[in-house]
Protein backbone atom coordinates (compact mmCIF):
# COMPACT_ATOMS: atom_id res chain seq x y z
CA UNK A 1 0.00 0.00 0.00
CA UNK A 2 1.34 3.43 -0.92
CA UNK A 3 1.73 5.85 1.94
CA UNK A 4 -0.72 8.33 0.46
CA UNK A 5 -3.26 5.51 0.10
CA UNK A 6 -2.67 4.49 3.68
CA UNK A 7 -3.25 8.06 4.84
CA UNK A 8 -6.55 8.17 3.03
CA UNK A 9 -7.78 5.15 4.92
CA UNK A 10 -6.36 5.89 8.36
CA UNK A 11 -8.28 7.71 11.08
CA UNK A 12 -8.54 11.49 10.68
CA UNK A 13 -6.64 12.53 13.78
CA UNK A 14 -4.94 11.28 16.87
CA UNK A 15 -7.18 10.53 19.83
CA UNK A 16 -5.58 11.61 23.06
CA UNK A 17 -5.31 8.80 25.60
CA UNK A 18 -7.72 10.18 28.18
CA UNK A 19 -11.00 12.05 28.56
CA UNK A 20 -12.09 15.10 30.54
CA UNK A 21 -15.49 14.98 32.16
CA UNK A 22 -16.34 12.04 29.94
CA UNK A 23 -15.55 13.91 26.70
CA UNK A 24 -12.64 12.66 24.58
CA UNK A 25 -10.06 15.10 23.27
CA UNK A 26 -8.63 14.80 19.78
CA UNK A 27 -5.38 16.46 18.84
CA UNK A 28 -5.35 17.88 15.36
CA UNK A 29 -2.12 18.51 13.51
CA UNK A 30 -0.64 17.78 10.10
CA UNK A 31 2.00 19.02 7.73
CA UNK A 32 -0.12 18.05 4.77
CA UNK A 33 -2.17 20.60 2.89
CA UNK A 34 -4.77 17.86 2.69
CA UNK A 35 -5.77 18.20 6.33
CA UNK A 36 -8.28 20.59 7.82
CA UNK A 37 -7.62 22.43 11.06
CA UNK A 38 -4.13 20.91 11.11
CA UNK A 39 -0.65 22.37 11.50
CA UNK A 40 0.90 24.80 13.93
CA UNK A 41 0.93 28.53 14.21
CA UNK A 42 2.50 31.82 15.10
CA UNK A 43 2.59 32.64 18.79
CA UNK A 44 0.25 35.61 18.85
CA UNK A 45 -0.96 34.43 22.26
CA UNK A 46 -4.45 34.49 20.76
CA UNK A 47 -6.95 31.66 20.93
CA UNK A 48 -9.74 30.97 18.45
CA UNK A 49 -12.71 28.85 19.52
CA UNK A 50 -14.82 27.57 16.63
CA UNK A 51 -18.37 26.49 17.42
CA UNK A 52 -20.05 24.46 14.70
CA UNK A 53 -23.85 24.44 14.69
CA UNK A 54 -24.19 21.23 12.78
CA UNK A 55 -27.20 20.74 10.53
CA UNK A 56 -27.87 24.19 9.10
CA UNK A 57 -29.18 26.76 11.56
CA UNK A 58 -32.37 28.69 10.77
CA UNK A 59 -30.97 32.22 10.72
CA UNK A 60 -34.33 33.95 10.25
CA UNK A 61 -35.54 32.62 13.61
CA UNK A 62 -32.17 33.32 15.26
CA UNK A 63 -31.45 36.91 14.28
CA UNK A 64 -34.95 38.07 13.47
CA UNK A 65 -35.48 40.89 10.96
CA UNK A 66 -38.39 42.57 12.72
CA UNK A 67 -38.55 45.21 9.99
CA UNK A 68 -39.44 42.39 7.55
CA UNK A 69 -42.01 40.83 9.85
CA UNK A 70 -45.04 41.49 7.70
CA UNK A 71 -43.68 39.64 4.67
CA UNK A 72 -42.16 36.87 6.79
CA UNK A 73 -45.46 36.22 8.49
CA UNK A 74 -47.03 35.40 5.13
CA UNK A 75 -44.67 32.50 4.41
CA UNK A 76 -43.59 31.12 7.77
CA UNK A 77 -46.54 31.77 10.02
CA UNK A 78 -46.35 28.26 11.52
CA UNK A 79 -42.77 28.75 12.79
CA UNK A 80 -42.49 32.53 13.09
CA UNK A 81 -41.64 33.93 16.52
CA UNK A 82 -44.33 36.23 17.87
CA UNK A 83 -43.17 39.80 17.42
CA UNK A 84 -43.88 40.56 21.06
CA UNK A 85 -41.47 37.78 22.10
CA UNK A 86 -38.50 38.94 20.02
CA UNK A 87 -35.55 40.17 22.11
CA UNK A 88 -34.79 43.62 20.72
CA UNK A 89 -31.19 44.86 20.75
CA UNK A 90 -30.01 48.15 22.22
CA UNK A 91 -29.43 50.94 19.71
CA UNK A 92 -30.51 48.71 16.82
CA UNK A 93 -33.69 49.30 14.87
CA UNK A 94 -35.60 46.46 13.31
CA UNK A 95 -33.53 43.50 14.53
CA UNK A 96 -33.82 41.15 17.49
CA UNK A 97 -32.81 37.71 18.76
CA UNK A 98 -34.79 34.56 19.46
CA UNK A 99 -36.38 34.73 22.95
CA UNK A 100 -34.23 31.78 24.07
CA UNK A 101 -31.08 33.88 23.64
CA UNK A 102 -31.39 36.27 26.56
CA UNK A 103 -27.76 35.79 27.56
CA UNK A 104 -26.40 36.54 24.12
CA UNK A 105 -28.71 39.55 23.84
CA UNK A 106 -27.03 40.90 27.01
CA UNK A 107 -23.58 40.17 25.56
CA UNK A 108 -24.48 42.18 22.45
CA UNK A 109 -25.75 45.06 24.54
CA UNK A 110 -22.49 44.91 26.54
CA UNK A 111 -20.40 45.10 23.37
CA UNK A 112 -19.06 41.54 23.57
CA UNK A 113 -21.01 39.99 20.70
CA UNK A 114 -20.91 40.83 17.01
CA UNK A 115 -23.31 39.65 14.33
CA UNK A 116 -22.51 39.32 10.63
CA UNK A 117 -25.65 39.19 8.53
CA UNK A 118 -26.31 37.19 5.36
CA UNK A 119 -23.16 35.05 5.40
CA UNK A 120 -22.81 32.38 2.73
CA UNK A 121 -21.06 31.76 -0.58
CA UNK A 122 -21.90 32.07 -4.29
CA UNK A 123 -23.76 29.22 -5.99
CA UNK A 124 -24.57 27.43 -2.72
CA UNK A 125 -24.82 23.69 -2.33
CA UNK A 126 -27.67 22.26 -0.23
CA UNK A 127 -25.96 19.03 0.74
CA UNK A 128 -24.87 18.90 4.39
CA UNK A 129 -21.68 17.07 3.49
CA UNK A 130 -20.67 19.21 0.53
CA UNK A 131 -21.55 22.52 2.16
CA UNK A 132 -19.67 21.55 5.33
CA UNK A 133 -16.73 20.65 3.11
CA UNK A 134 -16.89 24.09 1.49
CA UNK A 135 -17.00 25.90 4.84
CA UNK A 136 -14.15 23.80 6.20
CA UNK A 137 -11.93 24.16 3.16
CA UNK A 138 -12.76 27.71 2.12
CA UNK A 139 -13.27 26.58 -1.46
CA UNK A 140 -15.53 27.83 -4.21
CA UNK A 141 -18.68 25.75 -4.59
CA UNK A 142 -17.46 24.29 -7.89
CA UNK A 143 -14.01 23.20 -6.73
CA UNK A 144 -12.95 20.45 -4.35
CA UNK A 145 -10.21 21.57 -1.98
CA UNK A 146 -8.86 18.85 0.25
CA UNK A 147 -7.19 21.18 2.74
CA UNK A 148 -8.81 23.28 5.46
CA UNK A 149 -8.49 27.04 5.84
CA UNK A 150 -7.15 26.80 9.38
CA UNK A 151 -4.88 23.93 8.34
CA UNK A 152 -3.37 26.06 5.58
CA UNK A 153 -2.86 28.89 8.03
CA UNK A 154 -1.21 26.66 10.61
CA UNK A 155 0.98 24.99 8.01
CA UNK A 156 1.97 28.44 6.75
CA UNK A 157 3.18 29.36 10.23
CA UNK A 158 4.81 26.02 11.12
CA UNK A 159 5.82 24.49 7.79
CA UNK A 160 8.06 21.86 9.41
CA UNK A 161 5.32 20.14 11.41
CA UNK A 162 5.21 17.27 12.40
CA UNK A 163 8.90 16.42 12.00
CA UNK A 164 10.59 17.54 15.20
CA UNK A 165 7.36 18.21 17.09
CA UNK A 166 6.56 18.59 19.90
CA UNK A 167 9.51 20.85 20.73
CA UNK A 168 10.44 23.66 23.09
CA UNK A 169 8.99 26.31 20.77
CA UNK A 170 5.66 24.51 20.39
CA UNK A 171 5.31 21.74 22.97
CA UNK A 172 1.52 21.53 22.86
CA UNK A 173 -1.10 20.31 20.38
CA UNK A 174 -1.63 22.65 17.49
CA UNK A 175 -5.41 22.42 17.64
CA UNK A 176 -7.85 20.50 19.78
CA UNK A 177 -11.30 19.18 19.10
CA UNK A 178 -13.37 18.52 22.17
CA UNK A 179 -16.24 16.04 22.09
CA UNK A 180 -17.17 12.87 20.32
CA UNK A 181 -18.93 14.27 17.24
CA UNK A 182 -16.04 14.22 14.80
CA UNK A 183 -17.43 13.56 11.33
CA UNK A 184 -18.60 17.14 10.59
CA UNK A 185 -15.20 18.58 11.45
CA UNK A 186 -13.30 16.25 9.11
CA UNK A 187 -15.90 15.79 6.42
CA UNK A 188 -14.54 15.74 2.90
CA UNK A 189 -10.84 15.38 3.72
CA UNK A 190 -8.95 13.07 1.40
CA UNK A 191 -5.85 12.63 3.51
CA UNK A 192 -5.81 11.94 7.23
CA UNK A 193 -2.77 12.31 9.41
CA UNK A 194 -3.55 10.59 12.72
CA UNK A 195 -4.68 7.55 14.56
CA UNK A 196 -6.70 6.51 17.60
CA UNK A 197 -4.78 5.49 20.71
CA UNK A 198 -6.63 3.28 23.17
CA UNK A 199 -3.80 2.18 25.45
CA UNK A 200 -0.78 4.49 25.37
CA UNK A 201 1.03 2.67 28.17
CA UNK A 202 1.51 -0.44 26.07
CA UNK A 203 1.09 0.70 22.47
CA UNK A 204 4.63 0.62 21.07
CA UNK A 205 6.00 1.76 24.45
CA UNK A 206 4.87 5.28 23.64
CA UNK A 207 5.73 6.90 26.92
CA UNK A 208 9.45 6.13 26.57
CA UNK A 209 9.46 6.70 22.85
CA UNK A 210 11.14 3.32 22.40
CA UNK A 211 9.19 2.05 19.43
CA UNK A 212 11.69 -0.57 18.41
CA UNK A 213 13.16 -1.22 14.98
CA UNK A 214 11.22 -1.82 11.81
CA UNK A 215 12.19 -3.77 8.70
CA UNK A 216 13.67 -1.81 5.79
CA UNK A 217 10.63 -2.41 3.62
CA UNK A 218 7.72 -0.35 2.39
CA UNK A 219 5.50 -1.86 5.10
CA UNK A 220 8.20 -1.15 7.66
CA UNK A 221 8.29 2.51 6.66
CA UNK A 222 4.54 2.75 7.02
CA UNK A 223 4.76 1.20 10.47
CA UNK A 224 7.47 3.66 11.45
CA UNK A 225 5.19 6.51 10.39
CA UNK A 226 2.30 5.12 12.43
CA UNK A 227 4.50 4.90 15.49
CA UNK A 228 5.73 8.45 15.02
CA UNK A 229 2.15 9.81 14.93
CA UNK A 230 1.16 7.65 17.91
CA UNK A 231 4.17 8.82 19.90
CA UNK A 232 3.30 12.45 19.21
CA UNK A 233 -0.30 11.85 20.25
CA UNK A 234 0.87 10.39 23.56
CA UNK A 235 3.28 13.27 24.17
CA UNK A 236 0.48 15.72 23.46
CA UNK A 237 -1.79 13.70 25.70
CA UNK A 238 0.60 14.15 28.60
CA UNK A 239 0.82 17.94 28.23
CA UNK A 240 -2.94 18.30 27.78
CA UNK A 241 -3.56 16.21 30.88
CA UNK A 242 -1.08 18.34 32.83
CA UNK A 243 -2.84 21.51 31.68
CA UNK A 244 -6.21 20.05 32.67
CA UNK A 245 -4.90 19.26 36.14
CA UNK A 246 -3.41 22.74 36.51
CA UNK A 247 -6.35 24.65 35.05
CA UNK A 248 -9.71 25.45 36.61
CA UNK A 249 -13.07 27.11 36.02
CA UNK A 250 -14.33 30.13 37.94
CA UNK A 251 -17.76 30.74 36.44
CA UNK A 252 -20.88 29.61 38.26
CA UNK A 253 -22.97 30.02 35.11
CA UNK A 254 -22.25 26.57 33.65
CA UNK A 255 -25.18 24.16 33.96
CA UNK A 256 -24.63 20.81 35.63
CA UNK A 257 -22.52 18.38 33.60
CA UNK A 258 -24.61 16.54 31.05
CA UNK A 259 -27.37 19.13 30.79
CA UNK A 260 -25.76 21.16 28.01
CA UNK A 261 -23.23 19.36 25.85
CA UNK A 262 -21.90 22.54 24.27
CA UNK A 263 -21.37 24.09 27.70
CA UNK A 264 -19.54 20.93 28.80
CA UNK A 265 -17.17 21.28 25.86
CA UNK A 266 -16.54 25.00 26.35
CA UNK A 267 -15.92 24.46 30.04
CA UNK A 268 -13.09 22.09 29.13
CA UNK A 269 -11.68 24.64 26.67
CA UNK A 270 -11.59 27.31 29.39
CA UNK A 271 -9.95 24.84 31.78
CA UNK A 272 -7.21 23.99 29.30
CA UNK A 273 -6.51 27.62 28.41
CA UNK A 274 -6.27 28.51 32.09
CA UNK A 275 -3.93 25.54 32.59
CA UNK A 276 -1.39 27.16 30.29
CA UNK A 277 -1.86 25.08 27.16
CA UNK A 278 -0.37 26.85 24.13
CA UNK A 279 -2.97 25.39 21.79
CA UNK A 280 -4.52 28.21 19.81
CA UNK A 281 -7.45 26.63 17.96
CA UNK A 282 -10.27 24.72 19.64
CA UNK A 283 -13.21 23.16 17.83
CA UNK A 284 -16.49 22.32 19.54
CA UNK A 285 -19.86 21.44 18.08
CA UNK A 286 -23.55 21.06 18.74
CA UNK A 287 -25.80 19.04 16.43
CA UNK A 288 -29.52 18.96 15.80
CA UNK A 289 -29.98 22.07 13.64
CA UNK A 290 -31.42 20.20 10.66
CA UNK A 291 -34.95 21.24 11.59
CA UNK A 292 -37.06 19.97 8.71
CA UNK A 293 -39.92 19.09 11.07
CA UNK A 294 -41.16 20.09 14.52
CA UNK A 295 -38.84 23.06 14.69
CA UNK A 296 -41.33 24.72 17.02
CA UNK A 297 -43.79 23.48 19.60
CA UNK A 298 -47.16 23.76 17.88
CA UNK A 299 -49.01 23.61 21.20
CA UNK A 300 -46.71 25.66 23.43
CA UNK A 301 -45.99 28.51 21.06
CA UNK A 302 -43.39 29.05 18.33
CA UNK A 303 -40.93 30.47 20.84
CA UNK A 304 -40.65 26.96 22.28
CA UNK A 305 -39.60 23.68 20.73
CA UNK A 306 -36.51 21.99 19.30
CA UNK A 307 -34.92 25.08 17.77
CA UNK A 308 -35.57 27.13 20.88
CA UNK A 309 -33.89 24.44 23.00
CA UNK A 310 -30.84 24.45 20.73
CA UNK A 311 -30.49 28.23 20.71
CA UNK A 312 -30.98 28.26 24.47
CA UNK A 313 -28.08 25.83 24.84
CA UNK A 314 -25.89 27.92 22.54
CA UNK A 315 -26.66 31.10 24.45
CA UNK A 316 -26.22 29.50 27.88
CA UNK A 317 -22.91 27.89 26.88
CA UNK A 318 -21.39 30.99 25.29
CA UNK A 319 -22.42 33.21 28.21
CA UNK A 320 -20.91 30.80 30.75
CA UNK A 321 -17.72 30.42 28.74
CA UNK A 322 -17.26 34.17 28.32
CA UNK A 323 -17.93 34.73 32.01
CA UNK A 324 -15.37 32.05 32.85
CA UNK A 325 -12.74 33.49 30.53
CA UNK A 326 -13.22 36.93 32.04
CA UNK A 327 -12.97 35.70 35.64
CA UNK A 328 -9.85 33.72 34.73
CA UNK A 329 -8.30 36.90 33.33
CA UNK A 330 -8.02 35.42 29.83
CA UNK A 331 -10.58 37.49 27.95
CA UNK A 332 -7.90 39.55 26.23
CA UNK A 333 -6.72 36.43 24.42
CA UNK A 334 -9.86 34.54 23.39
CA UNK A 335 -12.13 34.97 20.37
CA UNK A 336 -15.15 32.78 19.66
CA UNK A 337 -16.96 32.26 16.37
CA UNK A 338 -20.01 30.22 15.36
CA UNK A 339 -20.69 28.77 11.95
CA UNK A 340 -23.18 26.44 10.29
CA UNK A 341 -23.05 24.86 6.85
CA UNK A 342 -26.06 26.85 5.61
CA UNK A 343 -29.25 28.57 6.72
CA UNK A 344 -32.88 27.63 5.95
CA UNK A 345 -35.43 28.65 3.33
CA UNK A 346 -37.46 31.81 3.69
CA UNK A 347 -40.73 29.90 3.66
CA UNK A 348 -41.46 27.21 6.23
CA UNK A 349 -42.82 23.81 5.25
CA UNK A 350 -46.01 22.01 6.26
CA UNK A 351 -44.18 19.97 8.92
CA UNK A 352 -43.63 23.00 11.14
CA UNK A 353 -40.04 23.13 10.01
CA UNK A 354 -37.73 24.71 7.48
CA UNK A 355 -35.70 23.26 4.62
CA UNK A 356 -32.11 23.75 3.50
CA UNK A 357 -31.36 27.32 2.53
CA UNK A 358 -28.51 29.68 1.82
CA UNK A 359 -27.24 32.62 3.83
CA UNK A 360 -27.51 32.98 7.61
CA UNK A 361 -26.06 35.14 10.40
CA UNK A 362 -22.72 34.34 12.06
CA UNK A 363 -21.70 35.30 15.61
CA UNK A 364 -18.33 36.41 16.96
CA UNK A 365 -17.81 37.01 20.64
CA UNK A 366 -15.10 38.20 23.00
CA UNK A 367 -13.46 41.28 24.42
CA UNK A 368 -12.02 42.41 21.09
CA UNK A 369 -15.19 41.94 19.04
CA UNK A 370 -16.89 45.07 17.82
CA UNK A 371 -20.35 44.74 19.34
CA UNK A 372 -22.41 45.61 16.32
CA UNK A 373 -24.31 44.17 13.40
CA UNK A 374 -22.30 44.01 10.18
CA UNK A 375 -24.60 44.23 7.20
CA UNK A 376 -28.29 44.91 6.71
CA UNK A 377 -31.19 42.65 7.55
CA UNK A 378 -32.13 40.16 4.84
CA UNK A 379 -34.78 41.60 2.57
CA UNK A 380 -37.98 39.54 2.28
CA UNK A 381 -40.02 40.14 -0.88
CA UNK A 382 -43.78 40.43 -0.72
CA UNK A 383 -44.17 37.26 -2.78
CA UNK A 384 -42.12 34.21 -1.80
CA UNK A 385 -42.22 30.68 -3.18
CA UNK A 386 -41.07 27.53 -1.40
CA UNK A 387 -37.90 27.56 -3.51
CA UNK A 388 -36.87 31.13 -2.72
CA UNK A 389 -33.77 31.79 -0.68
CA UNK A 390 -31.97 34.65 1.00
CA UNK A 391 -29.35 36.55 -0.93
CA UNK A 392 -25.79 36.21 0.31
CA UNK A 393 -24.19 39.56 1.16
CA UNK A 394 -21.00 38.49 2.93
CA UNK A 395 -18.82 35.64 1.76
CA UNK A 396 -17.85 33.49 4.74
CA UNK A 397 -14.26 33.67 3.54
CA UNK A 398 -14.30 37.40 4.22
CA UNK A 399 -14.88 36.53 7.87
CA UNK A 400 -12.05 33.98 7.79
CA UNK A 401 -9.70 36.49 6.17
CA UNK A 402 -10.64 39.08 8.79
CA UNK A 403 -9.85 36.66 11.62
CA UNK A 404 -6.51 35.75 10.05
CA UNK A 405 -5.53 39.38 9.55
CA UNK A 406 -6.93 41.07 12.64
CA UNK A 407 -6.78 38.27 15.23
CA UNK A 408 -3.86 36.09 14.17
CA UNK A 409 -2.01 39.09 12.76
CA UNK A 410 -1.19 37.46 9.44
CA UNK A 411 0.24 39.78 6.76
CA UNK A 412 -2.11 40.37 3.84
CA UNK A 413 0.09 38.43 1.43
CA UNK A 414 -0.04 35.41 3.70
CA UNK A 415 -3.80 35.81 4.13
CA UNK A 416 -4.15 35.59 0.35
CA UNK A 417 -1.96 32.48 0.34
CA UNK A 418 -4.05 30.76 2.99
CA UNK A 419 -7.39 31.74 1.45
CA UNK A 420 -6.14 31.00 -2.11
CA UNK A 421 -7.91 34.14 -3.34
CA UNK A 422 -8.10 37.78 -2.34
CA UNK A 423 -11.05 38.58 -0.10
CA UNK A 424 -11.98 41.96 1.31
CA UNK A 425 -11.84 41.93 5.08
CA UNK A 426 -14.61 43.19 7.36
CA UNK A 427 -14.45 45.57 10.30
CA UNK A 428 -15.19 42.96 12.96
CA UNK A 429 -12.40 43.27 15.56
CA UNK A 430 -10.47 46.03 17.22
CA UNK A 431 -6.68 46.33 17.04
CA UNK A 432 -5.54 43.23 18.92
CA UNK A 433 -2.35 42.16 17.12
CA UNK A 434 0.64 41.64 19.40
CA UNK A 435 2.98 39.30 17.53
CA UNK A 436 6.59 40.14 16.69
CA UNK A 437 8.25 39.25 13.39
CA UNK A 438 11.28 37.82 15.20
CA UNK A 439 9.16 35.47 17.29
CA UNK A 440 7.18 34.46 14.24
CA UNK A 441 10.30 33.52 12.32
CA UNK A 442 11.60 31.60 15.33
CA UNK A 443 8.44 29.53 15.43
CA UNK A 444 8.47 29.00 11.68
CA UNK A 445 11.95 27.50 11.95
CA UNK A 446 11.01 25.12 14.75
CA UNK A 447 11.07 21.43 13.99
CA UNK A 448 13.06 19.87 11.17
CA UNK A 449 12.90 21.59 7.77
CA UNK A 450 13.30 19.40 4.72
CA UNK A 451 12.12 21.78 2.00
CA UNK A 452 12.00 25.56 1.46
CA UNK A 453 11.79 27.92 -1.49
CA UNK A 454 12.94 31.44 -2.35
CA UNK A 455 11.63 33.90 -3.32
CA UNK A 456 8.15 33.43 -1.91
CA UNK A 457 5.91 35.09 -3.09
CA UNK A 458 7.26 35.14 -6.65
CA UNK A 459 6.06 36.19 -10.10
CA UNK A 460 7.52 33.75 -12.60
CA UNK A 461 9.94 31.33 -10.97
CA UNK A 462 11.34 30.19 -7.65
CA UNK A 463 14.11 27.95 -6.40
CA UNK A 464 13.22 24.98 -4.23
CA UNK A 465 15.86 23.81 -1.74
CA UNK A 466 15.50 20.35 -0.27
CA UNK A 467 17.54 18.12 2.01
CA UNK A 468 18.59 14.52 1.58
CA UNK A 469 20.12 12.10 4.03
CA UNK A 470 21.30 9.95 1.18
CA UNK A 471 18.56 8.11 -0.67
CA UNK A 472 15.50 8.56 -2.84
CA UNK A 473 13.72 11.94 -2.75
CA UNK A 474 10.45 12.85 -4.44
CA UNK A 475 9.24 16.45 -4.76
CA UNK A 476 5.97 17.24 -6.51
CA UNK A 477 4.32 20.51 -7.47
CA UNK A 478 0.62 20.36 -6.64
CA UNK A 479 -2.23 22.83 -6.89
CA UNK A 480 -4.76 23.90 -4.26
CA UNK A 481 -7.04 21.01 -5.19
CA UNK A 482 -4.34 18.46 -4.48
CA UNK A 483 -3.67 17.65 -8.15
CA UNK A 484 -0.10 16.86 -9.12
CA UNK A 485 1.01 19.32 -11.80
CA UNK A 486 4.53 18.04 -12.28
CA UNK A 487 7.25 16.05 -10.58
CA UNK A 488 10.24 18.26 -9.75
CA UNK A 489 12.49 15.65 -8.17
CA UNK A 490 12.37 11.85 -8.35
CA UNK A 491 15.83 10.40 -7.88
CA UNK A 492 18.48 9.27 -5.42
CA UNK A 493 20.45 12.18 -3.95
CA UNK A 494 23.57 12.19 -1.78
CA UNK A 495 23.44 13.56 1.75
CA UNK A 496 23.18 17.35 1.88
CA UNK A 497 21.14 20.25 0.53
CA UNK A 498 20.12 20.46 -3.10
CA UNK A 499 18.42 23.07 -5.29
CA UNK A 500 16.00 22.82 -8.18
CA UNK A 501 14.88 25.78 -10.29
CA UNK A 502 11.11 25.85 -10.90
CA UNK A 503 9.74 27.85 -13.83
CA UNK A 504 6.03 28.53 -13.23
CA UNK A 505 5.53 31.27 -15.81
CA UNK A 506 2.97 29.10 -17.58
CA UNK A 507 0.73 28.80 -14.52
CA UNK A 508 -1.87 31.35 -13.34
CA UNK A 509 -1.35 33.33 -10.15
CA UNK A 510 -2.42 31.54 -7.00
CA UNK A 511 -1.34 29.23 -4.22
CA UNK A 512 0.69 26.13 -5.03
CA UNK A 513 2.50 23.57 -2.92
CA UNK A 514 5.73 21.61 -3.06
CA UNK A 515 5.29 18.21 -1.47
CA UNK A 516 8.49 16.56 -0.27
CA UNK A 517 8.62 12.82 0.40
CA UNK A 518 11.56 10.78 1.67
CA UNK A 519 11.03 7.39 3.23
CA UNK A 520 8.46 7.98 5.99
CA UNK A 521 9.00 11.76 6.02
CA UNK A 522 6.63 14.13 4.28
CA UNK A 523 6.51 17.90 4.30
CA UNK A 524 4.55 20.46 2.28
CA UNK A 525 5.59 24.01 1.51
CA UNK A 526 3.05 26.65 0.42
CA UNK A 527 4.11 28.97 -2.40
CA UNK A 528 2.30 32.06 -3.70
CA UNK A 529 2.58 33.05 -7.34
CA UNK A 530 1.54 36.68 -7.77
CA UNK A 531 0.64 38.64 -10.87
Image: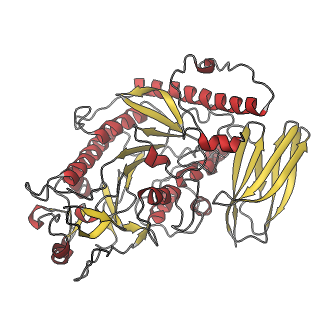
Camera-side residue of 261 and 483: 483
Camera sees residue 20: yes
**357 sits left or right of 64 in the view:** right
Quarter of the view holding residue 216: top right
The answer to whether 443 appears left or right of 45 in the picture is right
In front: 200, or 109?
A: 200
Residue 167 location in percent, x, y?
A: 63, 32
- Residue at 20% x, 49% y is 309
Residues 89 and 62: in front is 62
**Along the horizontal axis of the image, is 443 left or right of 68?**
right
Q: Residue at x 63, y 51 (%)?
A: 33
Q: Is residue 66 above or below residue 27?
A: below
Tell me residue 255's x, y (percent).
Answer: 22, 36
Q: Position of residue 153 (x, y in %)?
A: 57, 52
Report the quarter where the C terminus lies.
Answer: bottom right
- Residue furthest right in the image: 494
Please name the residue shown 78% across and 37% down the image.
Answer: 519
Provide residue 430's location: percent of width, then percent of height.
Answer: 41, 59
Question: Which is more toward the observer, 227 or 401?
Answer: 227
Colour mapping used in the image: secondary structure
| 408 sits to left or right of 475 | left
* Label tally: 0
In the rendered image, which quarter is residue 349 located in?
bottom left
**Is 212 placed above or below 166 here?**
above
Amino acid sequence: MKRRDFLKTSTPFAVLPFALNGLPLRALGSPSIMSALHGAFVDTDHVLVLIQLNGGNDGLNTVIPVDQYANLSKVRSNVMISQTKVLLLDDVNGTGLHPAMTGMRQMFNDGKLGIVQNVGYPNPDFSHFRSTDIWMSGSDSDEVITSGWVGRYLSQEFPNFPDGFPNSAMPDPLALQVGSVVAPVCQGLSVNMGMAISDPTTYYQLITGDTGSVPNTRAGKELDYIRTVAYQANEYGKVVKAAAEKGNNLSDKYPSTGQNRLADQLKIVAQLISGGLKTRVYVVSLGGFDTHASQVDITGGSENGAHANLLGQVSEAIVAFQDDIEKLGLDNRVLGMTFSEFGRRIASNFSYGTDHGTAAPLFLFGKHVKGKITGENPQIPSTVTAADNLQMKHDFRQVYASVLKDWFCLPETDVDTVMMHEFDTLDLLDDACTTSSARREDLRRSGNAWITNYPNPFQFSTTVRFASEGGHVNVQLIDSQGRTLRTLVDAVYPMGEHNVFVDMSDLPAGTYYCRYQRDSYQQTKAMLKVR
